[in-house]
Image (cartoon, rainbow, N blue to C red):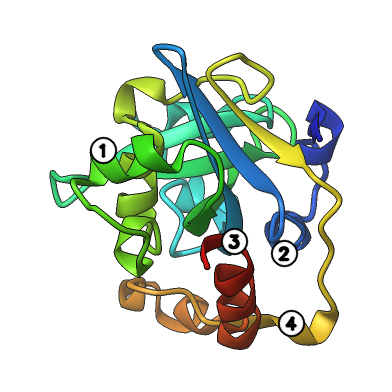
Amino acid sequence: MKKIGRDFYLREDVVNISKELIGKFLVTRFNGKLTSGMIIETEAYNGSMDKASHAYNFRRTARNEVMYGVGGASYVYLCYGIHHLFNIVTNKKDVPHAVLIRAILPKDGVETMLKRRKLKTITKKVSDGPGTLSQALGIKTNHSGTPLNSELIWVEDRNINFKKSEIEAGPRIGVDYAGKDALLPYRFRLTEQTVNKIRNEWYS
């Protein structure tokens, strides 16, 4: 188990990074409580050229300013005034690429994650969605800009690899406003068969 270094995030191909994040572990340590989950679903956002991106046409606001920083930082924003959505900033400074983490499988600190989600047992409701995973891991908008080599939030490589056939690609969710860009195959997810197999191994 090792933290992923900044070089991983500084690469230019945000779509490939998004795919490679499948199987990595998103880890947090807040108030001494460590929690983690394996990333099973991501979405790539290709910066100023991508109509689905917050930074389309080089849009720059107080909220998305962190996207223009050096890759390897957290970008967390509030959706519908309720959900804290966690993204990973990639590429070099002033190139606003980002990967939205859409779902994880809980691994470490499960009891803490259940308590945060006000649930008693592991089900899809715990972290199979971008808002729920942030709540389970304790991530909030005030963590936006946190470096991913910090002691608060990081990503680990635990040497888990999947076959190409186990990762599905498809259009992103909830970006119909982006026209043709909404149809781009920028969303990656482990197949349900693979996810269910891991669930059985971890939680049975």
Which sits earlier in the primary sequence, circle 4 or circle 2?
Answer: 2
Residue 4: x %, y % from top left: 79, 34
Tell me how far mark 3 sits from mark 2, CA to CA: 23 Å
Direction from residue 22 to residue 199 in the image, left or right: left
- Marks 3 and 1: which is nearer the front? 3
- Marks 4 and 2: which is nearer the front? 4
Q: Is residue 110 above or below residue 50?
A: above
Q: Which residue lies under the disc numbered 1? A: 116
Q: Which residue lies under the disc numbered 4? A: 166
Work out which quarter of the rendered image holds the N terminus and state it.
Answer: top right
Tell me how far mark 1 sits from mark 2, CA to CA: 28 Å
Tell me how far mark 4 sits from mark 2, CA to CA: 11 Å
Q: Nearer the viewer, residue 8 or 12?
A: 8
Residue 180: x %, y % from top left: 48, 83
The amino acid type, in three-letter code, at marker 1 is Arg
Which sits earlier in the primary sequence, circle 3 or circle 1?
Answer: 1
The amino acid type, in three-letter code, at marker 4 is Glu
Q: For mark 2, does the 10 Å Cα neighbourhood hold few (<14), some (14 to 19), or many (20 or more) residues? A: many
Q: Determine the residue positioned at 30% across, 41% down.
A: 135
Q: Which residue lies under the disc numbered 3? A: 202
